[in-house]
Image (spheres, rainbow, N blue to C red):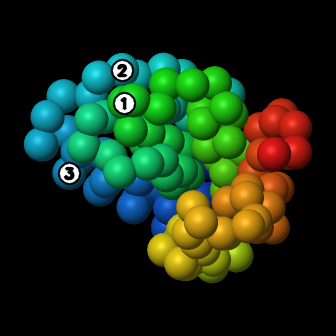
Amino acid sequence: MKNILLYIWQLPQAVLGSIFWLSLRLTDKFDKKIPTPYGVAYYHKNMKDGISLGPFIFIKSRYRDKDTLLHETGHQRQSLYLGPLYLFVIGIPSAIHYLFWSPKSLKSYYKFWCEAWADKLGGLRER
């Protein structure tokens, strides 16, 4: 019952996560699936980087490091806190930041407010 209520609370991102899961599943099998405190993480070779959509985390298979998983788990917590507002408050700003940020930038990608908050919620030190 608790999982159903959490799915409903996070409905917009949970639906997107379900669709994303299905689209990746149709292309190939997931390399690895692991439970997280707030859902599940899937590793897939066709991912570009990582994304968290409600109870779902999708990470490129070669990023099997603990920091990436903890960061995305932080985004899962943001989704739990914000519910239906998550995509507007976190998802869209994070996606725009991802599209326009450059590795040549003098600032770390994780200094952006919603990424820094995800790191903190995931238990990562400032980076």
Circle 2 SS class: strand
Give the residue drawn at x 32%, y 46%: 47
Which is nearer the N-term, disc 3 or disc 2? 3
Q: Residues within 10 Å of mark 2 (few under 14, many from 20)?
A: few
Pointer 1 residue:
61
Mark 3: few/some/many CA within 10 Å (<14, 14-19, 20+) = few
Q: Nearer the viewer, mark 1 or mark 2?
A: 1
Q: Earlier in the sequence, mark 1 or mark 2?
A: 2
Q: Which residue is mark 2?
A: 32
Q: Amino acid at mark 1?
A: Ser
Work out whether residue 96 or residue 85 is closer to the camera in this orientation and state it. Answer: 96
Q: What amino acid type should be assigned to the residue bearing mark 2?
A: Lys
**Mark 3, secondary structure of its residue:** helix
Q: CA distance from mark 1 to mark 3?
A: 16 Å
The disc label shown at residue 23, or none: 3
Residue plotted at (29% across, 56% down)? 19
Using the rendered view, name the quadrant where residue 126 is placed: top right
- What kind of residue is marked 3? Ser
Horizontal placement of 31 versus 90: left or right? left
Q: Are marks 3 and 2 in contact (CB under 8 Å)?
A: no
Mark 1 vs 2: CB contact within 8 A: yes
Image depth: mark 1 or mark 3 in front: 1
Residue placed most toward the observer, 62 or 56:
62
1 to 51, vertically: above or below: above
**Residue 4 point in image, percent of width and height:** 55, 44
Q: CA distance from mark 1 to mark 2?
A: 8 Å
Residue closer to the observer: 82 or 104: 104
